[in-house]
Image (tube, grey):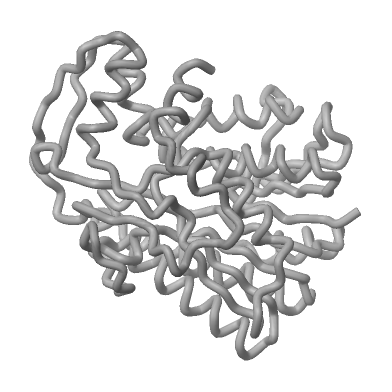
């Protein structure tokens, strides 16, 4: 049985990916620092779904075994902690690393830049260093579409021009990852995530907030008068893509993929679709635009993973219906 270290496993995508691994007979070690970037109860609830008792002692470095999956364990810890990461590798014979832990969010990243550098750059570097010394089979790093900055709706040109500290730290981590792949001959794949949504998503996610605000008759805040476009992709599709990537050794030990649909949707169109699905009328409120907020971005077709059911992935209304009916 292959062992996977999953960082950020109490997060939205990490939780869904952990279930995918466990359902496919992998042994999983989840590491998460359980920070309070958003309500920690979301993270504790996700962990409970895979049998990690949130009422148990979640002290730093303590190991908890799942009550549902005997091959799953959770450790509260910091990916910058070399001694802890060394111990995890030594005790669990880690073969794959799925690195999802990050200090997230473009907005506000300028107010706390050192924490973004620590978590996203230093933390990733620490994981890469320990992984290379332990000769892992594959290191997969979930980066972000924020590395692109703004891109034209019909433009397939690939330009790395982040406009936020968050995007800049993710790009820096990508560059360091490639260095380890090239110099240490360690297989590394980077998946640049676009706008992922689905059950148990982050409460600050646009679609999640729209659904909750529509249900509770709360105003939906729009930047730039709603003239913003995003590449929305359902979490099940992302999990499947990342799982296939993990099992596919990259040529020349390094590969970058865009994890999106290649279609940009105007956010006001998303609101209108949710209005139809929920039978509610949105109260819209225009707010001042944050300079670090991207206006438009979508996945580049040439960077997307092969053999994907793109027709299903781009069926935004069908996936939104699935989401709101859960």
- Give above or below for 122 relative to 10: below
Residue at image location 71% in from the left, 78% down from the top: 132
Residue 157 placement: quadrant: bottom left
Residue 85 appearing in the image: yes
Q: Quadrant of residue 267?
A: top left
Q: Nearer the viewer, residue 139 or 108?
A: 139
What x and y, as percent, mark residue 92? 85, 57
- Residue 146 lies, in percent from the top left, at 34, 59
In x, y percent, where is residue 144? 42, 58
Where residue 292 appears, x then y in whole percent?
A: 20, 55
Front in this rendered view, residue 99 or 118: 99
Q: Is residue 177 above or below residue 279?
A: below
The residue closer to the viewer here, 60 or 74, is 74
Single out the residue that lies furthest toward the right.
1
> Is residue 78 visible in this depiction of the protein?
no
Q: Name which residue lies at 63% across and 52% down.
A: 7
Task: Give left or right: position of 267 versus 66.
Answer: left
Quadrant of the image containing the C terminus: top right
How many numbered discs? 0
In the depicted structure, whether residue 49 falls above or below residue 252: above
Nearest the viewer among 276 and 252 is 276
Give the vertical position of 202 relative to 244 (above or below): above
Q: Which residue is depicted at the point 44% across and 52% down?
A: 260
Give the residue at the far bottom of this rendering.
183
Q: Quadrant of residue 141?
A: bottom right
Left or right, 91 with reference to 168: right
Q: Please state if 32 lies on the left or on the right of 131 as rendered.
A: left
């Amino acid at each position: 049985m292959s062992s996977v270290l999953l960082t950020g496993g109490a997060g939205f995508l990490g939780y869904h990916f952990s279930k995918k691994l466990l359902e496919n007979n992998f042994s999983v070690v989840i590491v998460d620092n359980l920070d309070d970037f958003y309500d920690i109860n979301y993270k504790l609830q996700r962990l409970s779904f895979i049998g990690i008792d949130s009422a148990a002692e979640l002290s730093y470095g303590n190991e908890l075994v799942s009550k549902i999956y005997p091959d799953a364990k959770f450790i509260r810890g910091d990916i910058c902690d070399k001694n802890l990461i060394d111990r995890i590798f030594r005790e669990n014979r880690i073969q794959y690393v799925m690195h999802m832990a990050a200090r997230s969010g473009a907005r506000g990243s300028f107010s706390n830049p050192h924490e973004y550098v620590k978590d996203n750059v230093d933390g990733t570097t620490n994981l890469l260093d320990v992984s290379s010394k332990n000769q892992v089979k594959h290191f997969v790093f979930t980066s972000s579409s924020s590395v692109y900055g703004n891109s034209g709706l019909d433009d397939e040109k690939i330009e790395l021009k982040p406009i936020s500290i968050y995007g800049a730290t993710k790009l820096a981590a990508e560059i360091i990852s490639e260095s380890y792949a090239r110099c240490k001959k360690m297989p590394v794949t980077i998946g640049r995530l676009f706008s992922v949504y689905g059950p148990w998503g982050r409460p600050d996610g646009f679609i999640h907030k729209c659904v909750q605000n529509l249900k509770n008759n709360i105003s939906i805040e729009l930047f730039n008068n709603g003239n913003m476009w995003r590449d929305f992709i359902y979490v099940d599709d992302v999990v499947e893509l990342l799982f296939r990537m993990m099992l596919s050794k990259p040529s020349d030990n390094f590969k970058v993929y865009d994890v999106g649909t290649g279609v940009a949707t105007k956010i006001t169109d998303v609101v209108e679709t949710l209005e139809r699905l929920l039978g509610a009328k949105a109260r819209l409120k225009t707010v001042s635009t944050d300079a670090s907020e991207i206006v438009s971005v979508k996945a580049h077709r040439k960077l997307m993973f092969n053999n994907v059911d793109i027709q299903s992935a781009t069926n935004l209304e069908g996936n939104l219906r699935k989401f709101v009916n859960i």
